[in-house]
Amino acid sequence: MRIGSIIVLVWLLIGVVAAAQRDYFDSGPVNCAGFGTIAVTVIAGPLNYMGVNPKVADCDVPQPSP
């Protein structure tokens, strides 16, 4: 259990580094697609360095009913 937690933590940290190198944290519009792109980049982790470039082009957030 402990080794699994460490692996997941390192995986996500590598994803954060990849997102920071792509300047996702300080550039671009702050909207649903921007947050989605950051999230999938962090989740992809080391796969970012193997050619994976995940992006969220469009997302529709449901509006509350009146």
Image (tube, rainbow, N blue to C red):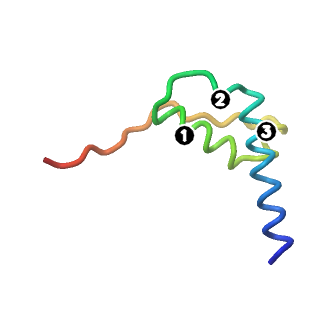
Q: Amino acid at mark 2?
A: Tyr
Q: Residues within 10 Å of mark 2 (few under 14, many from 20)?
A: some
Res 16 quadrant in image: top right
* Mark number, residue 36: 1
Residue 30 x %, y %: 49, 29
* Mark number, residue 24: 2
Q: Is residue 52 above or below residue 23?
A: below
Residue 9 x %, y %: 78, 58
Distance from Cα at disc 1 to Cα at disc 3 = 16 Å
Q: Is residue 13 above or below residue 21?
A: below
Is 52 situated left or right of 25 in this image? right
Residue drawn 51% across the image and 30% down it: 57
Residue 31 x %, y %: 46, 31
Q: Is residue 28 above or below residue 39?
A: above
Residue drawn 23% across the image and 48% down it: 64
Q: Amino acid at mark 1?
A: Gly
Q: How many marks?
A: 3
